Image (cartoon, coloured by chain):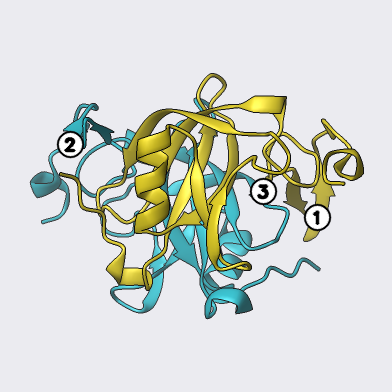
Chain colours: A cyan, B yellow
Amino acid sequence: MVKLDFDKTNGLIPAIAQDADTGEVLMLAYMNQASFNETLASGKATYFSRSRQSLWKKGETSGHVQHVKEIRVDCDHDTILLKVEQVGGAACHKGYKSCFFKTIENNEFKIVEKRVFDPKEVYK
Amino acid sequence: MVKLDFDKTNGLIPAIAQDADTGEVLMLAYMNQASFNETLASGKATYFSRSRQSLWKKGETSGHVQHVKEIRVDCDHDTILLKVEQVGGAACHKGYKSCFFKTIENNEFKIVEKRVFDPKEVYK
């Protein structure tokens, strides 16, 4: 029975979602024990929304579900790495494949990716 | 001038280090404003150690410095993704290339990577 260290950070630990095929880092969200259990049971990434303070089944609104291919944990058991298949090709609610679509160059943000979908069309 | 959202989580936000060449996720640590500034200024990953409550220049003891090739931030400006060149070939203090050397399978941890160095030889 695996036990992760949810206690260190008030019940929530970071979970990184990485594209299982390309290795691209798609997003980072948080999990509590219940969302981790739900992820294990369903095979779909389920996070805990800090803003809504509730379980967040990724893709429930947008259809952009994440099928979990592999679950890794770090040496301290306080970070999760999910290797996922991202349905719809985009993890970010702003319409990009990855939430990490901006670089920092010369102390400025710069968008370096292209939008995959228009958020206004997906979140109606 | 870039401004990240350090306030949401008491001054510390997660920073993912990813191998710039292979895309492998190496580790996750935390940064405060000072460590972020130091990372930008030095070009070497500098975190904030939650256990020691001080700036943590990655590799200062082991020599396993991370040269930062690219800095990305997520859509909410509350997570950092560093693309790095990992000196010494290993990010994890337990001697593995990546801290994510364990999978979860059938509700058990399973080590799926090989050690690159012996921690007892590096941290004397």
Q: Mark 1 lies on which chain?
A: B
Callouts 3 and 1 in the same chain: no
Q: What secondary structure is marked by label 3?
A: strand
Q: Quadrant of the N terminus of chain B?
A: top left
Q: How crowded is mark 2: few (under 14 residues within 10 Å), some or many (20 or more)?
A: few
Which one is nearer the viewer's eye here, A79 or A114?
A79
Q: Where is residue B90 in the image (x, y as percent from the top left)?
A: 71, 33
At horizontal 60% and vertical 45% (from top left) the residue drawn is B27
- Give the number of the mark in front: 3 or 2: 2
- Residue B14, compared with residue B120, is above or below; it is below
Q: Is residue A75 left or right of residue A54?
A: right
- What whole-number distance in Å separates the C-alpha atoms at marks 2 and 1? 41 Å
Q: Residues within 10 Å of mark 1 (few under 14, many from 20)?
A: some
Q: Mark 3 lies on which chain?
A: A
Which one is nearer the viewer's eye here, A12 or A65?
A12
- Residue A65, compared with residue A49, is above or below; it is above
Q: What secondary structure is marked by label 1?
A: strand
Q: What secondary structure is marked by label 2?
A: strand
At horizontal 51% and vertical 72% (from top left) the residue drawn is A12
Label 1: which residue? B109
Q: Is residue B115 left or right of residue B11?
A: right
Mark seen at residue A72:
3
- Give the number of the mark in front: 2 or 1: 2
The first of marks 3 and 2 along the sequence is 3
Whether residue A44 appears in this view of the structure is: no
Q: Where is residue B100 in the image (x, y as percent from the top left)?
A: 68, 45
Name which residue type carries label 1.
Phe
Label 2: which residue? A108
Name which residue type carries label 3.
Arg
Question: For the image shown, how many numbered marks are present on the structure?
Answer: 3
- What whole-number distance in Å separates the C-alpha atoms at marks 3 and 2? 33 Å
Whether residue B28 appears in this view of the structure is: yes
